[in-house]
Amino acid sequence: MNMNKKRVFYAMPMHAFLCLCVAFTLNACGNGDSGLPGQNGNSASNMAASNKSASDTPSPATPAANAKILYASPIGSGAACSQGAPCGLSGAQQAVRAQLSAGAIDVAVQLADGPYRLANTWAFGAVDSGTSGHPVVWYAASGAHPVISGATQVTGWSQLGTSGVWTAPAPANSNTRQLYINGTAAPIAQRTPAQLGFKGGWQGSATGYDISADSAAMAWFAKLNATQVAGVEFDYPAGNGAWTESRCRVASYSDGKLVMTQPCWKNVTSRATFSQASGGLPSMSSSKMPASLQNAVGLLQPGQWFLDSAASTLYYQPVSGQSVAALDVELPRLESLLQGAGTLANPLHDVTFSGLQFSYATWNDPSTSVGFADVQSNLRMTLANNQGMCGFSSPAGSCPWGSLTQPLANVSFSASNNVTFSGNRFVNLGGAGLAFMYGSSNNLIQGNEFTAIASTGILLGCTYDPTPGATNAAAIKQNCNPSPSLVAKDTVGTNEIMTGNTISNNVIHHIGSDYSSACGITLLFGRKTTVTHNEIHDVPYTAITAGVIQGHVDEANHPQESVNINADNTISNNLLYDYMKVLSDGAAIYVEGHQAQYYYKADGVTIDPVATLAHGIQIQGNVAFEGNNTNFTYYDDAGSEWINWKGNVAFDSSPRDQGGCSPTGHFWITGNYISGSLNTYPYCNQAIDVNLGQNTTIASLSDVPTSLLSNAGLTSAYQSLAASVSSKMSYASPVSGNSSQVLVAGGGFLSDPPVFFGSVQAANVQYLSDGFLIASVPAGSTATNVTVGQLTGRINDDNARFVYAGSWGHLANRGDGDYLDDLHYTTASSDTVTLTFSGTAIQVFGEMYTDQGNLGISIDGGAQQTVNTVPADGQRHGNVATYTSPTLTKGAHTIVITKLSGTYATFDGVNIFQ
């Protein structure tokens, strides 16, 4: 048993983790509304039940009854597109166009199961449009899971000598920042300076580093040829502020001098500043050492990969116990999977995508000389070092602050109206998941899952169009759609404003895996946008952001330097938890800049606060908890104004639940339930015109009206989506006074899930929603080690329902092939681990090695069986099924595992069969 082996901590900020079991563990914690001026208030408890109508009925996943149905298959060909002779995607698209040209009203394409490996981007234009109320529907066949893939499956592996590294041929001209192995992103080759033995003392300059004081670093770079040096990337978590993670590549190395690529290096270390700015966009010290070095074959460690593009060779070093030949290795080739693009005069419109999965695309621009000079929320500088920080002009606002470069989305639409995405999965993507921009209006993103995405989940709008018109038309055409030539004849004005888009009932989790400043949802500029009843958790930075960066020259003293067209937007009834898991200085909901157009009283001079706020952003009924590194749960930052914070919940997220720095103001903060402070603006100018009323301080989520809690997150019609996403428990309220009930909070709960207190199941569970349950504590139990759901499939050894007796220790990050890279161990004979479970069979997992001995296993108090965990070949084997039970009667059983002999006994969890 290798108890002293240390795990390498990779610098990648997050990696998506999809659980195989439905139970999660938690050690439970122990520890009035005034309305608008002149209007009647409405308490949070009364308000909570009022918005369930939003998307109560799912969008149709199937076409109209009289639709002309065409059929597609991954192996389809030809033009028949019949059920017996299906087409490929391209053929089906041509057949749709023919049907539309012939006057067909309702046309649909049914996609069979399997991977659709695209040779090129699946492109849609105006010619692919349906008609109002009669969209062209692209949908999955019943029970099918079509995958729109931009990857090549890599085979033909061979071991590279005795190094433990394997190689395989890659397609010519391959270029990617991601590799997916068995459906999960694998980290690229990387090590920290400490792992490489670097001593530090690097001296920065305008061009790069002098590393002559670090002999180990000089020796390492000297071994690389020029091409290899130019592939090395440096990663700087929090380099440009606690909310950023910048990356730049090395250009060259010679005689102790590292030259970094430009303009990336200048954009990271020497940013322009303006005295009028109300929020800092700091430069990084040029002498700051990278947290990790990435993308060189000499950096490989177990579980990592490297692509030699010039030699068309892929390298992979498997973890212990992996058979490379048995792996599904997906190498992305495309950056864009699906792209819809029309013009303002002739948009793409009335198309629905339902039941599809979009996977295996990359985004290569951060690998170029522009790198990833992070500013905020995955917006970055790619041009001059003052990009997005222009000088000011007359009239105010005509030179928009914050015209930064936004991340590429692997599925994107521009000048597209009435497009629906319903019931799809966006998973394993190298850019952002889904984006709409350039005048796209009345689109619906509903009932989808976004996960394992390198950048942002969903993005609406464009950084270049806060005030669309003739003065910035050229910049909008160049930056807000994929084809400037396509839109060359467009006249840009108010017709370019995005209006009426809805994001509802989606689950967004484990995004920002490569670019940790990513947000779950990013809203830039638009009107009548509705973001409602979404569930966002396990994100590295802010859950939802609106107007980010654009307000950074406004504040109360000069509120109109950078105006925009935002108005009538709503963020309501979202369930937000476990956000800000990697970076700092962010929020559950983060707002900057103007959020309303001004309305005036009869004198034409005095602002009418009632009318203006009615058209401001309405942030209502959201529930946010477990905020990790949050600065303000609800954050109104630089230049933010006209926000109605009403009836929201903030718990255990930040000591400051609402506030920010250098806002303008005009805030109504009413009827909220908070565990921290409100109206807090430390170290900067205060907001003007702040109206607080009937807010309630809470000590637990159980202090919040259950009607408000149950109305946050997915609506009842979307519980099928909750069932498809692994449940996650994040909080259980303490038991206080005479109460014997515990409020359990998280997400993905099904309609009658079992709740366990340790290994004892609660007899009485009240289901509030997919995010909240109330459970009665069983007699003799305490409100600790609470888990939700029946155990099934592979269960890790850290699950709370395992009862460890004796001196068991927990060891993580060994890198020896343990399941989820951790296990329990003991050196004391007679120590036991016990589990009560429901199923028809069970397997016990652990390590087999020469320093271990026998285990005793008993089920339901039966005779103890002896299991030998010393391997015959004398080699270490991690994550081995050391015991498999006979078939059991369906129902509850108890297994007891006992250490009998050997220096160590190990336990790596179980697999339960239903």
Image (spheres, rainbow, N blue to C red):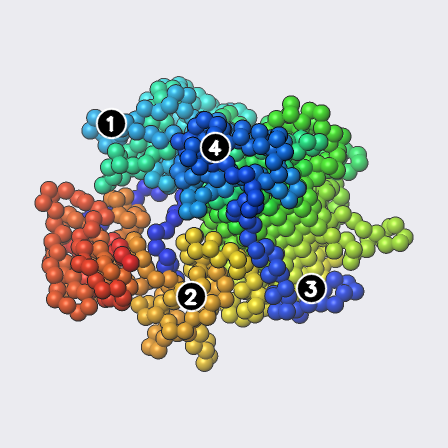
Tell me the mark number nearer the camera, choosing from 2 and 1: 2
Please state the horizontal and vertical placement of residue 571, each as a whole percent of the image. 62, 53
Q: Mark 1 points at which residue?
A: 158
Nearest to the observer: residue 276 or residue 902: 902
Tell me the mark number nearer the camera, choosing from 3 and 4: 4
Task: Give the distance between the C-alpha atoms of the residues marked 4 and 1, in whole angstroms.
Answer: 41 Å
| Three-letter code, disc 1 | Ser
Task: Give the distance between the C-alpha atoms of the residues marked 3 and 4, in whole angstroms.
Answer: 62 Å
Q: How crowded is mark 2: few (under 14 residues within 10 Å), some or many (20 or more)?
A: few
Q: How crowded is mark 4: few (under 14 residues within 10 Å), some or many (20 or more)?
A: many
| Three-letter code, disc 4 | Cys
Task: Give the distance between the C-alpha atoms of the residues marked 4 and 2, in whole angstroms.
Answer: 43 Å
Judged left or right of residue 899, residue 63 is: right
Q: Is mark 1 on a helix, strand or loop?
A: strand
Mark nearer the N terminus (4 vs 2): 4
Please state the horizontal and vertical placement of residue 144, each as a whole percent of the image. 42, 44
Q: Residue at x 81, y 51 (%)?
A: 599
Mark 1 and mark 3 residues within 8 Å of each other at the beta carbon? no
Q: Mark 2 points at which residue?
A: 752
Judged left or right of residue 23, residue 881 is: left
Judged left or right of residue 19, residue 323 is: left
Q: Residue at x 52, y 50 (%)?
A: 447
